Image (cartoon, grey):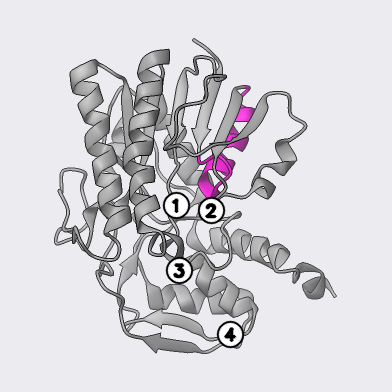
Amino acid sequence: MSDLVVVTGGAGFLGSNLCDRLLAMGRRVVALDDLSTGDEAHVSHLAANPNFELHRHDVTQVWPQRLEGPSRIFNLACPASPAYYQQHPVRTTLTSAIGMWRVLEAALHSGSRVLQGSTSEVYGDPEVHPQKESYHGLVNPIGPRSCYDEGKRVAEAMCFAYHRERGLPVRLVRIFNSYGPRLRAGDGRVVSNFIVQALQGEPLTLYGKGEQTRSFCYVDDTVDGLLRMMEADIEGPVNIGNPTEHTVQELAELVLRLTGSRSKIEYHPLPADDPRRRRPDITLASTKLGWVPRVSLEDGLRETIAHFRRQLGLADRLAA
């Protein structure tokens, strides 16, 4: 088996953290990223590593010929930032649909195994709680979030079409609200929004009454789940997320406490199709992968807050 691993979206938040772990495991890694939402700075510390390469590449385009037979392809090439994907719905849909097709064709040619990084968003605004992998979801196919939700659902369907018709080995995970260092300010995710607002002394923007729930999984735990899934004897889908459920109000209050911020909380109307509850059933992950998340929300937020202090140039001010 080749020791080469390709990570599409490898300069993104999750992809760059995955690249770090793969290199630490002794693998050769090629990161593909068009840098529309990824950032070269996320992998700049790897530039001198002879086992790492970053190629600027749009996953919807023809697969780079110079890549020689990877044994594994992690497909994480899709913007997960609501602020981005709602501004670029066509590009987002194509990245999931055409990008998935390009990856699967490349894998078929080289005999690679593919892991598709899907999302809890395929469950939409769920009527079943917590969400099991057998639940088919409640998604608005024409709403403002549909470019992401339905794009990921198409990618899932394509994965299993290639698996059933052409025998391609695939793995499918549904990722729930991963967070941690290398999130970017202004990406529209609730964790990064709250932390940046708190650190800058701005009001925390909370939609609705703050009663909607999310389940936040620290990036190190998410990466561990992806690695275990890639080598498992199960195609999936498998939920990868933290089963501890928090209201958005609770998250805001915890961020304020951990940052020591005096920011107020401002309440705004709920956006269209915003899920009311989100919590994974991780029975499959725990029984089939031996995986459970280990980092508490408070510990993970401390690391994420430290990251944003550095990103915003506030670390020196704190030390002073």
Which callout, 1 or 4, points to the residue nearer the camera? 1
The amino acid type, in three-letter code, at marker 3 is: Val
Write the residue at 44% across / 29% down: 62
Give the label on residue 79, or none.
1
Residue under numbered circle 3: 190
Whole-percent x, y for residue 92 in the image: 38, 51
Q: Are marks 1 and 3 in contact (CB under 8 Å)?
A: no
Q: The disc labelled 4 sits on which kind of residue?
A: Glu
Q: Please tell me the numbered disc located at residue 32.
A: none
Do the numbered discs 2 and 1 sit on residues whose CB atoms are within 8 Å?
A: yes
Q: Residues within 10 Å of mark 4 (few under 14, many from 20)?
A: some
Residue topped by disc 2: 37
Residue on which the image places disc 4:
202
Residue 97 visible, this orientation: yes
Q: Quadrant of the C terminus?
A: bottom right
The residue furthest top is 1
> Does 47 appear above or below 299?
above
Q: Kindly indicate whether the residue at mark 4 contacts the one at mark 3 (C-beta within 8 angstroms).
A: no
**Does residue 120 lie above or below 265 as drawn?**
above
- Distance from label 3 to label 4 (Cα)? 14 Å
**Residues at circles 2 and 4 in contact by the CB criterion of under 8 Å:** no
